[in-house]
Image (tube, helix red, strand yellow):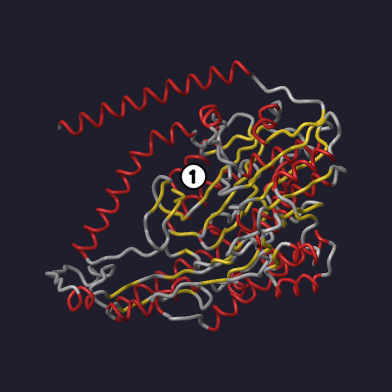
Amino acid sequence: MAKSRTKWILGVGCFGVVVVMGLVALLVLASFGAPSLPGRIVLGITLDGPITEVTVEDPFAQLLGEQPLSMRDLRKALIRAAEDDRVEGLRLRVDSFGGGLAGAQELRSLIARFQATGKWTAAYMDTAGEFSAGNLEYLVASSCEKVSLNPLGDVNLIGLSARTPFLRGSLDKLGIEPSFPGRKEYKSARFMFTHTGFTPAEEEMMGWLMDDIMEQLVGAVASSRGLEPAEVRHLISRAPFFGQEAADVKLVDELEDWGAFCERIEARRSTAARTVGLSRYLRSLPAEHGPKIAVITASGSIMTGESRRSFNPISGGEVMGAETIAKAWRKARELRGLKAVLFRVDSPGGSVVASEIVRQEMARTAAKVPVVVSMASVAGSGGYWITCGATRIVADPATLTGSIGVYAGHLNMKELYTDKLGITFGEMDRGANADLYGDLASWTPEQEQVIERMLDRIYNAFLERVADARGMTVEQVDELAGGRVFTGTQALERGLVDVIGGFDEALEETRKLAGLDPGAPVTLVDLPQPKPIWMQMLEAGRHDEEALDTTSASLRQWLQTGVVQTPGTVWMPPIWIR
């Protein structure tokens, strides 16, 4: 009791401190108001670390210098700067890029849009990878007209590498017998449990993904650097390049440190121009007002309940809670003056029930106003399921999507528990299938038939939803489905998406379907609302306790029943390409 009282007092005290600091931050920032800017501007942007999809304006975070960088902020700044007569150039520093290949493509598109207005751009890198791949960093930096590199830096434009883990060898050593039936041969998420390497179908699929993404990488670099694609391929085969070598092969223009780069940029800009950072520039911009477009952001593995973080070692991380996203759809429908919804999806799938809950709410909304899907890095399996019924689907060229298939998982762990760990279970059942979801025995032939019926039911439902949404027959969908994963460009060729592009292209499609003029000012309403940093700080302790409780509960379940959770039935294979 005393311990709980102490924790409560500490919690209230911390809350009070945060509130006071937040009020101080608000007062300080309010006293300054929107910062005044010089008549001529060079926009300065630094990329370093993870990039979130969206953040909320948070004076407390701004005061502490902890406001995270988001793709939404980058979009807003670059688009407004392209139209701003005060802005004459862009100074970009690329230390690292945590936005994935699709995010890099979107950022390149924004920089190209900026350059198209006649404004100059220059990028600086200390290094593009240091004893690590630098494909993404170089891809972003090379979108600028001029690229500078520290003399001791490297250009690790070394090509693509894909790695897929296989657990079968470990399971055999532990005495665990896996059984993972699925629909169909390209639904390879299950093979990580049942195989020790690629199946022929999986190897074929990984091949077409790698080939297409490599073509995109080569084409982008060739276009930016004025080189032939064949020459870029040859350079990649010779990489990495060290300092002067990178300049000799025309991958960079200048060898200089950050100080020299800044001095050269200062000499290039007009006399009256001053460099203004991203945050300051954004705070100076007047808010855009116009018709309402809701932006629903859905990221992570799809599970029932509220959005949260999962500690599952296989499919852990950010969780798209079906109830959280369903509430967002309901709230969107209640917005007065709503013109359309932009549904931003970044998910490898998960639970079929959770996916259907989200899809149903999306379809209800699409029956009232246009719904445009913007696929980010991944929108596969359940992540594609939730888009079925949208008015239009937009995908980045490198988006991983499709994976229209299903599988079920079962691990017989009896030998591990009994022979390896010495754990035995008293077993007693009532009902022929009472132990259907247990992990202490293999399925009986009758139980295997039950599982096959489940898989057929889910797979057929998946095919039907895609067929209805894409104007195809079930047979046509089945022919291109089978669990195959495609890039965005490949999905467009097969009729699974409508347009290639990023968030901004999706927003233009949304404007068009809503009957608005291209580029017309709109009010974007984010759902669910992102939380400011002070609220995240308050919740951090609670989340830590929940993580411990969840881990303890999972451990108790494992010890009591022998059941180990596996990812959902509509979860795409773990594919990492870098």
Judge whether 484 appears above or below 310 on screen. below
**Where is the N terminus found, in terms of image quarters?**
top left
What residue lies at 65% left-to-right and 37% top-to-bottom?
293
Residue to which mark 1 is pinned:
325
State the image coordinates of residue 450 (x, y, percent, origin top left): 34, 73
Residue 439 position within the rendered picture, expressed as x and y whole percent measured from the top left: 26, 71
Residue 473 appears left or right of 543? right
Q: Which residue is drawn at 79% across and 50% down?
A: 112
Front-most of 395 and 102?
102
Most foreground residue, 385 or 507: 507
Q: Say which quarter of the image contains residue 268.
A: top right
Going by the image, does 354 lie left or right of 506? left
Q: Considering the image in quadrants, where does the C terminus appear?
A: bottom right
279 above or below 22? below
Q: Is residue 185 above or below residue 60?
A: below
What amino acid is labelled 1 in the image?
A: Ile
Q: Is residue 249 left or right of residue 534?
A: right
- Residue 111 image offset from top left, x and y in percent: 76, 48
Horizontal side, residue 185 vs residue 86: left or right: left
